[in-house]
Structure formats: structure tokens, C-alpha cells
Image (cartoon, grey):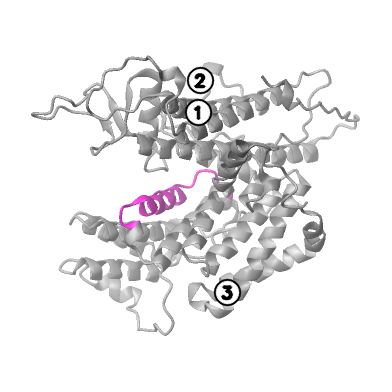
């Protein structure tokens, strides 16, 4: 399958309110908005409307002052104290404003491949805040779809194509006719397929991209108000590209979605169905369709060139990364699906501290899953340090540090990576921004501090899980008259902890996929740059049989 070396595709749908049919009210001009007195004296509803109008009117590099003014109005409005749904709307508008501060890549192709893009980082941060805010569920479903679609678009621009697909699919679960999300999901599958070294996997992704594009174009004809004409034209060109480059009929004929196995026992079948529903298999097909053919972890490293006589160290290391991930996945599943006490907990005497503490083997399995999964991020960095011969001292290798030439908060992306046209590797770099590091203060996930604190207390301090917990997660402070507040603990509700563990599992899965895809792109680059006429000798290794794993 062809692999694109073009500029990363920009988001197709802009972060704007999609007007209802017939809504053609005359809008104030940029000049009149800038000359106005601002939002003082306006109700919150009218202030939000005015902010949105100014952002819309400020499109274009010559109107950057309008974006600055709009962000100032955002700060002033937030200072009033907003209801959850108002705060979510405001976060959405902030994301739109930062979108206008991004370079328009069609005019600045070089800027498109910059790995560090502060405006894009801010846009993703505000969209995520809007997504996780308490007000999100109270928004109109069209607005929910806009937030999710835009978040997927910006993830895709950053190279985080796996996570982008999840956002677009969530939007479609809310409104199946929201063809902007469907068309962008199709485009995301196309980009994903272009970076796969398995033609079989790539073909299946192209097949489902083609199906999505066909329906998106049809829905655009009957639900025009869910998008824009330029987007529909883009999707039509994308579909024509697939028709020209891929034998869709042949892929459809040979792809057998039920060809895989879900296991022989009911217990294994339930487990594999759960993995499929949550898209936790290391198999790209599972990002396109939930089927038996995707119910395995067959993702492996691409072919790569080493010196004759070098041992297969990278293969062995990737084996270990996969094994730790799938074992942590199983530990999480068993810990969250336990319906009875385990015999290993019998005759274990524990005092009831009367704050609904959660103990037992199932609880420890989830805690273990969190620890093991989180540790894989730094191990991925260790792999990158070796594969790219970065030469970073082993004691200094971490998931955030591995991308920089220098230590410290003021370090920049290493020249080895910056502007590299390796989109999956850039996605891995942007994924690292979700994790808190004591040196790198900037993070892109509003929940990054909590995830890091949980990991730190799991490993080194005291994390306490509660079956019922009505307080705020974190260190507990004494409460007058309450003698059962555990002031040594970092307390978290058990359900909240399980949800965070699942998030970490999904992040690590995405990281392993980006690692493989990024390695394939790098091997293609090395092949083109290789000037030696010496012949290359191929070597394959046998597969470890399942029955040998004990």
C-alpha cells in the first residue's frame, strides 16, 4: 500500500457553530465587534454569543487582534463563575480561538511538520476540558458532536490517529447522521492504512474508510446543515483516491471478518468480546470494525535492517512490551469482572476502618494493572533510545525526556525528530505530552496530574481505594468531628480508579501502535537513504507456540 509523504491533513470541519437550516440572520462585522464595549453588562448567554461571533469574524492572519480580544473576553467571563454547561461552551470557544492562531498549513507547508505547535496544544487542551466537563452531557447533541469531531481532527493532525478514531466514533454514537465525523473518521482510517506495513491490515482499513465515505457523502446530501460544502468535496476526492489506488472489491471478497477465533470456552469468549468492545487488541483491524478477525494481538515490528551477526534484541524487547501489556489487560479484566471473593483472601484479617475501604485480590489485580501499564511508557522510550541510537544515558531515559537533545524544562525537540515527516512517531511524541514529568511542566491532558499522583502513590506511598467515596480524590485533610478520615492516604473511589486504569491501557495500546508505525516509516526513510550496493539477507524467526507459555 502507498505511504503518504505529504503534508499532514488539516482538520476538515472547523470549530464553528453549525447553523440550523434557514438561520441566515445578519451578523455583526469584525470592525463593529472590535469597536464595541466588550461583554460588560451582557448576560452570560449574550456574552458567549458575542465571543463566538468575534472568533468567527477574526478568521485570517490579519485579524489576530480579534483573537486576542476574544480570549480576553473568555477570561473575563470565566471570572464571573459559570454553570457547568456555560463553562463547557466557553472552553469550546477558547479552542476555536486557538485554532485561528495556528498557521494555515496550505500556505506554510514547512510549518506543518513542526513537532512543537503551542497553538495546537492549547486547542487540544481546551477541547478536552470541554469533553470531560460536567456540562458536556447537558449540551445539545450537535454541539457534543462538534466538540468530539474537532478533538478527533486535532488528534489526527498531531499524529494520534488511533485516539482520533475513538473521538469520531463517539460523535457518531451520539448522532449517526453527523457526516462530518463519519467523513473525518474515513480520512483517519486512510492515513492509518498508509502507515501500516501489513497490506492485509491496510486493505481492511481502506475498505471501511470507503464505506464511511460513501455514507458520509450520501448523508451530506440530505443533512447539509451538519457540515460544509468544502468538506463534502474533500470526502468525494478522498473516495476517488481510494477507488483509484485500492482494489476495494478484491479486499471485500477476501476479507473474512468471522475468520478469527474468540476461543473455545465461554470465559475466553467473554474476555475477547470485552477486548473488542473496548478496542484493546494490538490489531489495527479492531480500530475499524469489531469482529473475530480482529480478536488477536498479531501486531509486530516491521522488517528492519541490522548488521549481520547482531542479535534480535529489538524483537525480544518488543515481545516483552507486548506480553506485559496483554497480561496487564487480563489483570484489569479479571479484577473488574470478579463477582465473588477469592480463596487467597480467606483468613486474611484486615480491620474495617469504616470509610468503605476496598480490599481483595480483584482490587490488587487492577492496582497491578495500573502499575505495569504505566511503566510501559518509559520502556517505549528505552526502545526508541536504542533504535534511533540517541545515546541518552540509560538513567536519564524517560517518555518525555527521550525526544529532547538537552535536559531541563527549556529543552526543545531534538533535531533528529523536529520536522521529521514521520507522523506516527510525532503522534507518540504528542502522546507523551499527556503524562506529567517533574521537569516538563506543560501537559495536554487536564487529568495528567491526577494520573501521575496515583502512579506515584501506588509505587511509593499510600493509595487507598474506597467502595463508596463522596469526597474529592487526593490527599485527605482532617475534618472536625470525623475520626475516620485517613490523612495518610491518597483516596480514590474504586470505580474512578478502574476508569483511569482503562484509560492508561488505551494510551499504552496507542503508544505501541505508533511505535510500530513510526518504525516502519523510519525503515522506509533509511531504505531510500541507503547508498550501499551490498546485498541484504533476510532472516525470519519462528513463532513461540501458545502451549509453551506457562
Q: Secondary structure at mark 2?
A: helix
Q: Are marks 2 and 1 in contact (CB under 8 Å)?
A: yes
| Whole-percent x, y for residue 412 in the image | 49, 35
The kind of secondary structure the magenta stretch mainly shows is helix
Residue highlighted by disc 3: 219
| Res 418 visible | no
Q: Are marks 3 and 1 in contact (CB under 8 Å)?
A: no
Residue 117 lies in the magenta-colored region: yes
How dense is the environment of label 1, judged by Cα within 10 Å: few (below 14), some, or many (20 and up)?
many
Q: Secondary structure at mark 3?
A: helix
**Front-lying residue, 384 or 70:** 384
| Whole-percent x, y for residue 67 in the image | 35, 61
Which dot, 2 or 3, sits closer to the camera? 3
3D distance between C-alphas at marks 2 and 1: 7 Å
Q: Which image quarter: residue 465?
A: top left
3D distance between C-alphas at marks 3 and 1: 45 Å
Q: Residue at x 14, y 24 (%)?
A: 483
Residue highlighted by disc 1: 401
Q: Is residue 209 above or below residue 162?
A: below
Q: Secondary structure at mark 1?
A: helix
Residue highlighted by disc 2: 396
- Using residue 40 as the reference point, say whether residue 200 is left or right of it: right
Q: Residue at x 73, y 44 (%)?
A: 260
Chain-order first, disc 2 or disc 3:
3
First to last magenta residue range: 113-136
Numbered circles on residues, count? 3
Q: Is residue 366 above or below residue 82?
A: above
Amino acid at each position: 500500500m502507498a505511504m503518504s509523504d505529504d503534508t499532514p491533513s488539516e482538520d476538515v470541519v472547523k470549530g464553528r457553530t453549525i447553523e440550523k437550516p434557514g438561520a441566515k440572520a445578519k451578523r455583526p462585522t469584525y470592525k463593529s465587534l472590535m469597536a464595541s464595549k466588550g461583554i460588560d453588562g451582557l448576560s452570560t448567554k449574550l456574552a458567549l454569543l458575542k465571543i463566538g461571533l468575534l472568533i468567527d469574524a477574526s478568521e485570517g492572519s490579519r485579524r489576530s487582534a480579534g483573537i486576542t480580544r476574544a480570549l480576553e473576553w473568555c477570561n473575563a467571563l470565566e471570572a464571573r463563575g459559570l454553570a457547568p454547561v456555560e463553562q463547557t461552551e466557553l472552553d469550546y470557544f477558547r479552542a476555536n480561538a486557538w485554532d485561528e492562531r495556528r498557521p494555515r498549513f496550505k500556505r506554510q507547508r514547512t510549518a506543518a511538520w513542526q513537532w512543537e505547535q503551542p497553538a495546537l496544544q492549547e486547542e487540544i487542551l481546551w477541547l478536552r476540558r470541554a469533553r470531560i466537563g460536567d456540562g458536556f452531557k447537558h449540551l445539545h447533541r450537535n454541539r457534543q458532536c462538534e466538540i468530539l469531531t474537532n478533538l478527533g481532527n486535532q488528534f489526527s493532525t498531531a499524529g494520534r490517529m488511533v485516539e482520533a478514531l475513538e473521538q469520531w466514533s463517539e460523535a457518531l454514537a451520539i448522532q449517526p447522521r453527523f457526516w462530518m465525523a463519519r467523513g473525518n473518521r474515513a480520512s483517519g482510517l486512510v492515513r492509518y492504512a498508509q502507515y501500516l506495513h501489513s497490506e492485509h491490515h491496510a486493505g481492511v482499513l481502506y475498505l471501511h474508510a470507503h464505506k464511511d465515505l460513501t455514507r458520509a457523502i450520501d448523508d451530506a446530501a440530505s443533512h447539509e446543515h451538519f457540515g460544509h460544502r468544502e468538506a463534502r468535496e474533500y470526502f468525494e476526492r478522498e473516495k476517488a483516491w481510494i477507488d483509484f489506488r485500492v482494489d476495494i472489491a478484491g479486499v471485500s471478497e477476501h476479507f473474512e471478518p468471522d475468520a478469527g477465533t474468540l476461543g473455545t470456552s465461554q470465559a475466553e469468549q467473554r474476555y475477547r468480546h470485552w477486548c473488542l468492545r473496548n478496542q484493546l487488541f494490538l490489531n489495527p483491524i479492531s480500530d475499524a470494525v469489531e469482529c473475530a478477525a480482529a480478536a488477536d494481538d498479531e501486531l509486530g515490528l516491521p522488517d528492519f535492517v541490522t548488521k549481520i551477526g547482531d542479535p534480535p534484541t529489538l524483537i525480544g524487547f518488543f515481545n516483552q512490551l507486548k506480553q506485559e501489556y496483554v497480561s496487564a489487560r487480563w489483570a484489569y479484566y479479571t479484577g473488574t469482572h470478579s463477582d465473588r471473593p477469592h480463596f487467597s483472601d480467606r483468613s486474611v484479617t484486615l480491620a474495617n476502618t469504616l470509610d468503605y475501604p476496598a480490599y481483595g485480590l480483584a482490587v490488587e489485580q487492577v492496582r497491578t494493572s495500573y502499575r505495569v501499564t504505566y511503566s510501559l511508557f518509559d520502556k517505549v522510550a528505552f526502545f526508541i533510545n536504542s533504535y534511533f541510537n540517541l545515546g541518552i544515558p540509560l538513567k536519564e531515559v524517560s517518555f518525555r525526556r527521550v525526544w529532547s537533545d538537552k535536559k531541563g524544562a527549556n529543552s526543545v525537540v531534538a533535531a533528529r525528530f523536529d520536522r521529521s515527516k514521520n507522523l506516527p512517531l510525532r503522534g507518540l511524541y504528542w502522546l507523551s505530552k499527556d503524562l506529567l514529568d517533574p521537569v516538563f511542566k506543560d501537559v495536554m491532558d487536564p487529568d495528567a496530574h491526577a494520573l501521575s499522583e496515583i502512579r506515584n502513590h501506588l509505587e511509593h506511598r499510600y493509595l487507598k481505594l474506597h467502595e463508596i467515596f463522596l469526597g474529592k480524590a487526593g490527599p485527605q485533610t482532617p475534618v472536625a468531628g470525623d475520626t475516620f478520615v485517613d490523612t495518610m492516604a491518597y483516596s480514590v473511589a474504586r470505580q474512578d480508579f478502574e476508569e483511569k486504569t482503562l484509560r492508561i491501557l488505551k494510551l499504552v495500546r496507542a503508544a505501541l501502535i505508533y511505535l510500530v508505525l513510526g518504525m516502519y516509516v523510519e525503515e522506509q526513510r533509511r531504505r531510500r537513504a541507503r547508498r550501499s550496493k551490498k546485498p541484504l539477507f533476510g532472516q525470519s524467526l519462528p513463532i513461540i507456540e501458545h502451549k509453551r507459555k506457562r
